[in-house]
Amino acid sequence: MIDAAVCLPVLPARDLAEAQSFYAGLLGFAEIVYSDDNYLIVRRGSMELHFWHTADRNLAENTSCYIRGGEIPALYAEYAARGVPRLSAFEIRPWGMKEFYIHDPSGVLLRFGCAPEEIGA
């Protein structure tokens, strides 16, 4: 059987060591799949994020990634308990999704969301 295709974000990071520390230490992406001076791959369960090094602050601050699924409420509770910086409220947005946001140290916006019916809300 052939595996299903997946879409993996490749995000800019101004400091890959700082990105690794943030994503592994605070967000639970503890499996380091690959790391060198220019590229980083981290994984948490079925979620995998790729990072490439850039010095362009503007590029990082204008990049975002959307992570969706039924485990999003548990992630929010975990991140709130850990005191993750720049963690927004977890609420239903005008477009009908229940979401929270985090900005990583480079300024990349991580948007986590689920449809309320996915979680019985």
Image (cartoon, grey):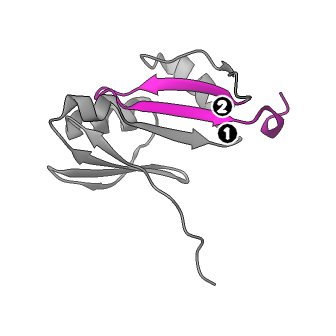
- From the image, tell me which residue sits under label 2: 74
Q: Is residue 51 left or right of residue 55?
A: right
Q: Are marks 2 and 1 in contact (CB under 8 Å)?
A: yes
Vertical comparison of 29 with 91: above or below: below
- Quarter-of-image position of residue 115: top right
Q: Position of residue 26 (x, y in %)?
A: 42, 29
- Quarter-of-image position of residue 120: top right
- From the image, tell me which residue sits under label 1: 71
**Residue stretch rendered in magenta on the structure:** 97-121
Q: Residue at x 28, y 29 (%)?
A: 106
Vertical comparison of 87 with 10: above or below: above
Q: Position of residue 93 (x, y in %)?
A: 68, 22
Compute the Cα span from label 2 to label 1: 5 Å
Q: Is residue 14 left or right of residue 30?
A: left
Vertical comparison of 121 with 16: above or below: above
Q: Amino acid at mark 2?
A: Ala
Q: Residue at x 49, y 20 (%)?
A: 82
